[in-house]
Amino acid sequence: LLSGGRAEASKVRNGMLKAFVEGRFTLGKDEAASRIVTDAGADVDEDGSVIALRTVAADGRSRAHLGGRSVPVGVLAELSEQVIAVHGQNDQLRLLRPAEQRDVIDRFAGDAVGGPLTAYREVRAEWLAVLTELTERSTRSREMAQQADLLKHGLAEIDAVAPEPGEDVELTEQIKRLAAVDELRSTATEAHAAVSGAQDGDPDAPGALGLVGEAARRLASAEDSALRDLVPRLEEAVTLLSDVGSELGGYVESLDADPALLEKVLARQADLKRLTRKYAADVDGVLAWAEDARRRLESMDTSEEALAALALRRDELAVRLVGHATEVSAARGKAAAELATAITKELSGLAMGQAELEITVEQRPAEHGDQQALAIDGHAVHAGPDGIDDVELLLRAHNGAPPLPVHKAASGGELSRVMLAIEVVLAHATPA
């Protein structure tokens, strides 16, 4: 009920109006539990404890209180996750797993194991990456060499053409101009004549510039001031037409009708099209392919120098990994002795006064062909994600009995009591 479980009317004794259950919990330094209590507006006693209360009425309705405040039942459920651990007989099954036995040591040791274990895992991840790359380059050297040749051939072909970003678009526009140069020259020449007049000075074809200029001269000599006032505006038109005429003349002179230039541009376009047919849809895509190919070639170096550099990096990481692994092992060994003594002491209060627990921490030998093997003191050991250690809990059931694995030395009930003793000893590692 204090854990926010379902309330049932059957919990109320016959003839009584309600049932209640009450618990006092010391929050200590548990930030999560303190936050739940604070958010609920509950009052914490001077000793840092808080009282949780659950009542169940005879009709099945229930109420929850925390620190003197009425709260939803869900608040008690959240708090119970932080402060209550329920031990049941099925917990003994967890104790049979090697990973669980190693976790018991690590939880008891705390930062003494956690710190070097974190460093070990970081170095191990890098070490495995180098191992994988070295193996791949060594075993796939022929395949990678073929791929490298194809990439080098493609890069040589692209470098020979040396395309520029957006060059294909610029060439298309240039070709359009060169192909239509005669039509463009005719259009520009006729427009120039219409604006500036005939090139031979034919008075019968003065052009817009001449006509506007003549109009300005006539109005300038008029007797009426209204007509003379129009002269500045016509002079502005003359200036504008003169500028347009000059630009049209320059455009006509800039048009290049050289067939050789058109042929040269078309040849350049053909070179670019050969690249876009092979490598990408446009020149920018071709350049991106080349950049990616260069990066891939850097990672496909199968030369002896590259393999030697990778092997050297592997060995450097292995030395660091051995250092972290042995530090983890030493911390586990120290914690194992302390934990075994503490658990044995707890067992004496659980009707197992003659029982004695031992915890062994031994390096796990690497099997033949193990890709994750480390050499430590002349022996090959397996470097797993949790270190190089196998941890085993041994139980000496009574004086004179040999130490045996807990699942062989203890009955189901005894195994459950061993697990309970472990949880009591590990109480410092969890706020529950």
Image (tube, helix red, strand yellow):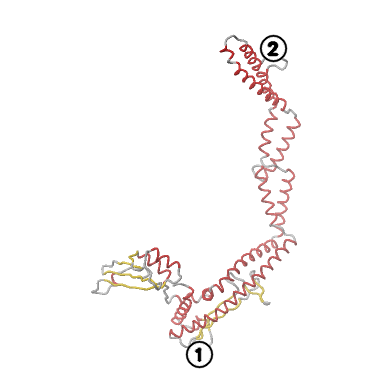
Q: Nearer the viewer, residue 287 or 254?
A: 254
Count of residue discs = 2
Q: Secondary structure at mark 2?
A: loop
Q: Position of residue 393 (x, y in %)?
A: 53, 80
Q: Secondary structure under badge 1?
A: loop
Q: Looking at the rendering, which quadrant does residue 231 occupy?
A: top right
Residue lying farthest to the right in this orientation: 260
Quadrant in the rendering for residue 144? bottom right
Tell me where residue 25 sits by quadrant. bottom left
Quarter holding the C terminus is: bottom left
- Callout 2 amino acid: Pro
Q: Residue at x 72, y 59 (%)?
A: 302
Please identify, in this view, whether the residue under mark 1 or under mark 2 is nearer the observer.
2
Q: Residue furthest top?
A: 223
Label 1 or label 2, whichever comes before in sequence order: 2
Residue that label 2 marks: 203
Residue of label 1: 399
Residue 110 coordinates in the image, percent (x, y): 53, 73
Percent coordinates x, y for residue 147 in the rendering: 70, 54
Of residues 136 and 348, the one nearer the viewer is 348
Badge 2: few (under 14), some or many (20 or more) residues near its Cα, within 10 Å? few
The image quadrant where one finds the N terminus is bottom left
Query: Quick check: 147 left or right of 429?
Result: right
Residue depicted at x 73% and y 27%: 257
Identify which amino acid the numbered label 1 is placed on. Answer: Asn
Question: How dense is the environment of label 1, judged by Cα within 10 Å: few (below 14), some, or many (20 and up)?
Answer: few
